[in-house]
Amino acid sequence: MKDYTPDKTRNVALVGHGSSGKTSLAAALLFDFGATGRLTKVDKGNTVTDYEPEEIDRKISINSAVCFFEANGHKINCVDTPGYSNFLWDTKAALRAVDGAAVLVDGVSGVEVGTEKVWEMLEEDELPRLVVINKLDRENANFKRVLESVVQFFGRRAVPVQLPIGEEKNFSGVIDLMRMKALVFEKDEGGKFKEEDVPAALQAEASKKRDELVEMIAENDEKLMEKYLDKGELSPEEIHSGLKKAVFFRQLYPVYACSALVNIGAQPLADGMIDLLPSPLERGSVKATVKGQPGTIKTSVDDPLAALVFKTLSDPYTGRISLIRVFSGKLSPDSVVSNATKETDEKISGLFFLQGKEQVPAGQAKCGDIVATAKLKVTTTGDTLSAKGAEVALPPIKFPEPSISFAIEPKSRADEDRISQASHRIMEEDPTVRFERDPDTSQLLISGGGELHVRIITDKLKKRYSVDVELKPPKISYKETIKGRADVQGRHKKQTGGRGQFGDVWIKMEPLPRGQDFVFEDKIFGGAIPRNYIPSVEKGLLEARKKGVLAGYPTVDFKVILYDGSYHEVDSSDIAFKIAASKAFKLAMKEARPTILEPVMSVEVYTPEAYMGDIMGNLNGRRGKLQGMEQKGNMRIIKATVPMAEMLDFEPTLTSITGGRGSFLMEFSHYEEVPSHLQQKIIAEAVKEGRVRPEEE
């Protein structure tokens, strides 16, 4: 393909709420500009950017996917991103690779949860953007109503540069307010249109909206405002340059009208991407750590290489594929670069551009372009690749911690054998997934951003790696401890026909502060127990503490002092003292007021203010303790500590309360005593499961 310079390149993310039409818009753009031979459809499962089996089955985007097309002497790299909350981490990572965005809004539903969330991401990354009101051919679609919702949520800086011609099934084109021309599309989904005069019925509204647009452009530029006040009009060149400048500084967000599904409005939108969104050169310098100090790097082909790996794919045939945005310099095949994050070198083999999953060979990737390479040895998502000796590191990508966990049980021995390699591949691709073995319950846990996220990962395990697993709620890692003190004897004596067994220990047991686990203190004097048996006493205690006396859970936060005992010259042995220590442990536990501890989580709930009362009430009902509240943008953050056992079903509850507008983060905080009435339920369950005998209650 043609070699494009940075000024002729655009990198644009298609973002928005799930099912707002991002993938369909990518399909229309690729078709209209000849990158594909037909207009592909999500419903038919043949789009370029939704190619994973899980995406085709569910008809939603799960991964960000890169595609490109050539238009008007420019190369436009589009990143089609997920819109559902479980996968927005991938959208956030993709925004590091682009210089602007098109925010899609459903022409029926208006601004939705995902719209708000991606808008906040764009604000954090200071990205210029266009707004696209899509699906205007649908029943009940209404451009005016949805525009009002956009302005309500994001302010009057969202200003239309187009108006729709016709409504719902009669939607047939758009009015270009900057040029005051009607673009009337043919009804065959071919994307062809004719330029005509503005229909008489729409002339008055179009003139009014054009005046409002010009006035908004003038408001953001002092020189243009002076001319506008003096002349009452701006030239076409001034309107264009003024709007481009306002978009760059995020003073205005041009609003377009579109129906990607029937291919109306995609080509004029591509013009907007070229004319109004910045090129990599116009975006300017990029923040970086240079020679260990905060600084910036220039966006220049002539400067040393600096590139960011913003996504990793795991291909069954080619292995690991790294998607790379080149910010400075150029990346060449068969070269050696430095991984500044891992502080090691990487060999770059072949380079290719991605058209969805299709690989298009690339000779070289210049500053500003998006490219991919395969089989890097140590490089993962978020790493910086730089010229050797350049000492440049771009800011890493921050990924959210998993918020929900499930236990997974392989359905067969073969599944169990394959799961290790498969889980490693998945974690390479998705940095927000964790596979880990719980040391207390021995369950293999999968953790992710939500239940949908976890279920899709298990689907991927089955379809891609032939690993069939069953999801179950995780067992709670309860612990046992003591609240009192004890002073007991543990004596083991057994006489058989030959040599017997004898061990005798006296111990004191006392509680320790939370988190101190276990302390063993030897205070034997005068040879009451020979020194060589002391380690056996400690081993006996360590083994016994693995199974507490109440419900069979590990015992923590206690101290044992071994202060006396006796032995037999012939019958004493290591095993005898281990057994004696175990008996002493059980006796002491029962005497020292044993109790059960539960894991308590630190929880942060992000919600619009309107739902705060309901959420705090819900957390209180889960035995939560409010720790404080903060504000972040339009969202409120409720901080609380809540027992893990109460949080297993919180995600669907939060979704129900907030209509999907809320989200939460959760991590382990500490252990606390379980209320006594709940302890009885835990003990009864332990008896039912056979962890303890009824007499051990």
Image: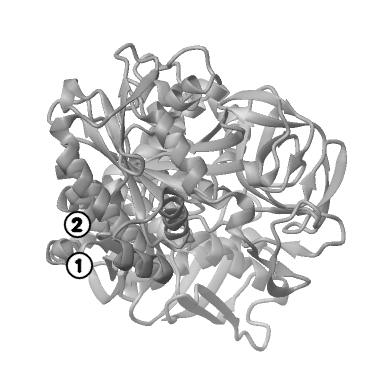
Question: 469 or 527, which lies in front?
Answer: 469
Q: Is residue 278 above or below residue 139?
A: below
Q: Is residue 668 above or below residue 195?
A: below
Total number of numbered labels? 2
Q: Is residue 633 left or right of residue 9?
A: left
Identity of the amino acid at label 2?
Answer: Gln
Q: Is residue 101 above or below residue 409?
A: below
Q: Position of residue 208 (x, y in %)?
A: 19, 49
Q: Is residue 83 left or right of residue 508?
A: left
- Which numbered circle lies on residue 152? 2
The answer to whether any part of residue 621 appears in the image is no
Question: 531 or 428, which lies in front?
Answer: 428
Question: 351 or 214, which lies in front?
Answer: 214
User: Mark 2 or 1 closer to N-term?
Assistant: 2
Marks 2 and 1 sit apart, C-alpha to C-alpha, by 51 Å
Q: Position of residue 211 (x, y in %)?
A: 25, 53
Q: Is residue 402 left or right of residue 685?
A: right
**Crowd tier of the residue under label 2, counting other residues whose Cα lies within 10 Å: few below 14, some 14–19, many 20 or above:** few
Circle 2: element type: helix
Colour scheme: one colour
Question: 124 or 273, which lies in front?
Answer: 273
Identity of the amino acid at label 1?
Answer: Ser
Residue at (58% x, 39% y) in the render:
429
Q: Position of residue 154 (x, y in %)?
A: 27, 58
Quadrant of residue 1 within the rendered picture: top right
Q: Residue furthest front?
A: 231
Q: Can you identify the residue that label 1 sits on? A: 676
